[in-house]
Amino acid sequence: MAVTAIELPIWLEAELRSDQAGETGAVWIYRGVLATQPGPALRQFCLRHLATEQRHLAEINALLPPQGRSLLLPIWRIAGFLTGFLPACVSERSVYLTVAAVETFVQAHYQQQIVHAEMRQFPNVKEKLAAFMRDEIDHKDEAANLAGGLPSAAAKRWCYLVGAGSKIAVRLARRV
Ligand SMILES: [Fe+2]
Ligand SMILES: [Fe+2]
């Protein structure tokens, strides 16, 4: 079934709203890192990822009817910005660890949407989300490789917080 922004069932609108929140957060993570004026390698990493997240966000926005959009977008922007800005103030490695943690969450999030039983009726949405998930896996692998080695105890706590925060954001965004 072809999907336009006006004929979404409520459950799918809620799921896409959570994706909109997530992709908004993702865009602002990289803006948060870039605000710290990182070195050339991290800057290039951020610009490349930012371009992909902006494309994801534009494609999600095109699927969601205006009344289905998250009312909390300003909050997702601030949360995303801080999720990039704070680790970037610590070290480049902290940014890579944070991105790997975020993308681990996002991969699982898209995966559960793709396997949703009702999603079979919306093959074009399913395909789109699967393509997004492949990009997020690339982002995760690249960030994990660049971080290298095991995270410190503090980094582990931070990444746990990032994962827990993302979970809360998804729950909220499905509603508003
Ligand atoms: Fe994305
Ligand atoms: Fe990503």
Image (tube, grey):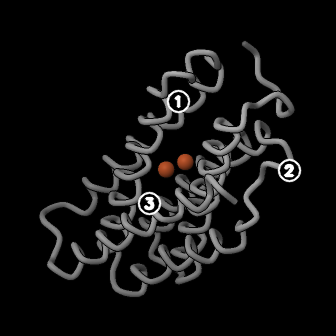
Q: Secondary structure at mark 1?
A: helix
Furthest residue toward bottom: 89
Which class describes the residues within 10 Å of circle 1: few (<14), some (14-19), or many (20+)? some
Q: Is residue 82 left or right of residue 21?
A: left
Identity of the amino acid at label 1?
Ala
Question: Mark 1 highlights which residue?
Answer: 131
Q: Nearer the viewer, residue 157 or 97?
A: 157
Discs 2/1, front: 2
The residue located at (79%, 48%) in the rendering is 68
Disc with the residue nearer the chain's start (3 vs 1): 1
Q: Nearer the viewer, mark 3 or mark 1?
A: 3
Q: Is mark 1 within 8 Å of ligand 1?
A: no
Percent from the top left, x then y, of residue 57?
A: 68, 48
From the top left corner, tell me how far across and down residue 175 is, in percent.
Answer: 65, 56
> Against 106, is 111 above or below?
above
The residue that label 3 is drawn on is 167
| Label 2 or label 1, whichever comes before in sequence order | 2
Note whether 34 is above or below 117 in the view shown.
below
Distance from the alpha carbon under mark 2 to that under mark 3: 23 Å
Mark earlier in primary sequence (2, 3): 2
Label 3 crowd (10 A; few <14 / some 14-19 / many >=20): some
Q: Residue at x 76, y 31 (%)?
A: 8
Q: Position of residue 33 (x, y in %)?
A: 51, 74
Q: Which residue is mark 2?
A: 67
Q: Which three-letter amino acid code belongs to the residue tagged 3?
A: Lys
Check contact, mark 3 vs mark 1: CB within 8 A: no
Residue at screen point 15% across, 79% down? 153
Q: Secondary structure at mark 3?
A: helix
